[in-house]
Image (spheres, rainbow, N blue to C red):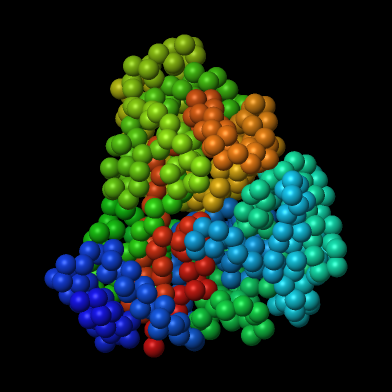
Amino acid sequence: MNRHMQYLASQAVAGKLSRRDFLGKAAALGFTAVSANLLLSSAAKAAGPQKGGTIRLGLQGGSTTDSLDPALVTNTVGLMVTRLWGETLVELAEDGGIEGKLAESYEASADAKTWTFKLRPGVTYSNGQNVTAEDVVKTMERHSGEDTKSGALGIMRGIKDVRADGDSVVFELDSPNADLPYLLADYHLIIQPNGGNDDPAAAIGTGPYIMKSSDMGVRFVAEKNPNYWGDLGNADTVEIIVINDDTARVAALQSGQVDVIDRVPPRTAKLVDRAPNITVHSTSAAGHYVFIMHCNTAPFDNNDVRMALKYGINRQEMVDKILNGYGTVGNDTPINASYPMYTELEQRQFDPDKAMHHMKKAGHDGAILLRTSDNSFPGAPDASALFQQSLNSAGIKLDVKREPNDGYWSEVWNNKPFCTSYWGGRPTQDQMFTTAYLSTADWNDTRFNNEQFDQMLVAARGELDVAKRTQMYADMSMILRDEGGLICPMFNDFVEATTDKVDGFVEGIPGQVLMNGYAASKLWVKA
């Protein structure tokens, strides 16, 4: 039976049998949808990628205020574009481990305080220059300078010194950190000539594609880098079109204007998947849709106000009505079961009486202003309206202001004291906490400043006893849950879709959206 199914899968991959017909035959033979899709994925891999053609992606999240400077990337469009032209030292592997990119290998000292990364020989930038260890040092310095706006600043705080040593780069840390390679896989840390100091937005890197045109918030075109050292990049040309409107993005996929889209609205995902030429992909990961409060700004500087809002949100209603089942309930911490060393905490429940109690204790009786837009996450305005209704039952008035999609990430997020947002998550607790909850992190978007939390974060990096380290991360999650400015009602699955024109999509890859941001480089156009 399996051999017959493998044959049918190979026929589907070759285009001699439609995917829908294949799945129908698989179901008739008793195969689940998951096992049938795995067979298809294996058959596609066995057949190997095809070269040439153009892949077009319709993505949500771009803005006219975006930049090609990798330090300033804040959304999915920026992630996908920088993945085309640039690379980091190391990258998250499909099995959740770390694999080399520009670093051929790496090793740590016995105390995990000194790390040495040996560069891959013979790699050049798209302008023909050789990659040097000095470029890596300059890159790290640019992301850690006092005036940097880099989203990786929190990560760089624990690095005491970076120096070139021949064809290697040596990192000296303030304290031991077994997770350093995961931190250096952060997508902001693209290696650039002279660290990007000459022109950080020049898009000169070592990636599989060369940028040919960039119209921020509108359209990007990249062509294959003929001198790329690796095996990424199957299509000759990649076109990324920014389509922030959910309906328009789905329509573009259905009409064939684009081949790949992100953020399929959960409420229509099952309907979209019924189209004969479209496949909807869903990946459970660390992504979460959130409401973020600045802990240093009134009235959110009062923890009773924060607790009132946390008890006043109906999390299950959010999962049911906003995610339509494509996700799980959150617990006001950015960590879920997708992380290593995860500990389940007691789930916070919707409790209007407790919400009312905390708000009265805070002495706040005015309305609270929440800012939102569709650009923050799919269905964010609807989620805000649900939040408003659930708070009403606790006697708490919430005003909701709908902000323009364009400019949301530069004007609202990380600027205004209470707004909707999203996080794609990170592969380890250390990286997630360091990026967004360390007091000194530039992306500390809840303005969370907790000395005990900071000390525990540093101590956990050097703890080699797994049980002790697991408990430390649980304690940190508890602090965030009970004192932080994060309201996390739900963890969203990454819901994305492709047409039958492309192949090679693999569900379940850890990391960020769209195959950890590599869909454009790993998919191929079917002949």
Is 149 located above or below residue 354 in the figure?
below
Is 347 located above or below residue 233 in the figure?
above
Q: Position of residue 349 (x, y in %)?
A: 35, 27
| Closest to the observer, 227 or 28 | 28
Q: Quadrant of residue 158?
A: top right
| Badge count | 0
Residue placed at 37% from the left, 17% from the top? Answer: 354
Q: Quadrant of residue 189?
A: bottom right
Q: Position of residue 193 (x, y in %)?
A: 78, 68
Residue placed at 48% from the left, 40% from the top? Answer: 342
Is 122 located above or below residue 487 in the figure?
below
Which quadrant would the C terminus be assigned to in this image? bottom left
Which quadrant would the N terminus be assigned to in this image? bottom left
Q: Position of residue 240 (x, y in %)?
A: 50, 70
| Closest to the observer, 399 or 291 | 291
| Closest to the observer, 376 or 105 | 105
Q: Looking at the image, which residue sits at the far left?
A: 28
Q: 11 left or right of 417?
A: left
Q: Position of residue 11 (x, y in %)?
A: 28, 85
Q: 465 left or right of 4?
A: right
Residue placed at 51% from the left, 58% from the top? Answer: 96
The answer to whether residue 400 is seen in the rendering is no
The answer to whether residue 193 is seen in the rendering is yes
Is 127 located above or below residue 80 in the figure?
below
Residue placed at 44% from the left, 83% from the top? Answer: 48
